[in-house]
Amino acid sequence: MTIEEDIAKLAAHVKATLGNGPFLPVGGWHHMGAVICDAILQQARHYERWVRPRVEDLRKSWPDADTVTRFRAHAAQGELSAILRTTHQRKLAAITAIADLLAASGVERRDELRLWLKEDAHRAALLAIRGVGPKTVDYLGTLVGGSHVAVDVHLRAFARQADVETTTYQGLRRVYEVTADRLGHDRGGLEHAVWNYMSSGPKR
């Protein structure tokens, strides 16, 4: 089985289940505190029921934490755990580590982060943080308006439905990216359409 065959299978499944679109890009957040926290909290959690309410609480509690510097200043006061309603120390540590890395790199706002993520060395620096994997890095890009494919359990399940045989993270991400390009869809838009479809309930 070649990657070209997997792309053809996925493209056929997209058209059969999702139609021809258009699949609009995901807007993400303009609030950098929300971006960083969302990226870490979403891991293995129900997004609408668990993650989004906590991120919204953060935005309401710290409306001025729309830059990395102001978010770090608020977090330094020790109230992040209470606002996010989690005592998960690894997640809280990862949030702090990402904020510290971005601050040290001079990244303050979403447009700056979107450009910063294009450099392999910067992505590698994020991956060196405990609790940050390839999916989280790609998802960060989506949260700041980039056109990324973050392969999660929903995208993997959709690919299995299409009998796609590629299973590695990098390989499956590439299958989705090329499929989106060939069908004329925004990459992030196709990812989000698949995610919405698969997360809406059981599929036969």
Image: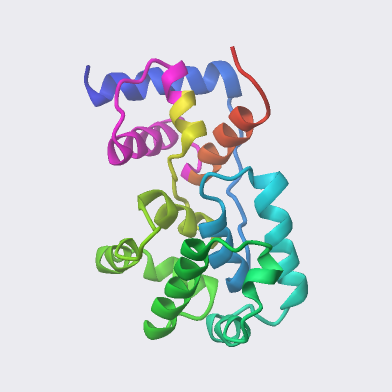
Residue at (45% x, 67% y) in the render = 94
Residue at (40% x, 34% y) in the render = 176
Q: Nearer the viewer, residue 54 or 138?
A: 54
Asked if residue 54 lies left or right of residue 180, the reply is right
Quarter of the picture holding the N terminus: top left
Tell me: residue 179, above or below residue 187. Answer: above
> Would residue 145 be seen by someone viewing this image from the given angle?
no
Q: Give the range drawn in magenta.
A: 159-187
Total labels drawn:
0
Q: Give how far across and how far down residue 155 sits, in percent.
A: 47, 32
Q: Nearer the viewer, residue 10 or 201?
A: 201
Asked if residue 90 lies left or right of residue 178, the reply is right
Tell me: residue 117, above or below residue 154. Answer: below
- Asked whether residue 166 is drawn in magenta, I would say yes
Tell me: residue 33, above or below residue 152. Answer: below
Q: Which of 96 and 183 is in front in this view?
A: 96
Quarter of the picture holding the C terminus: top right
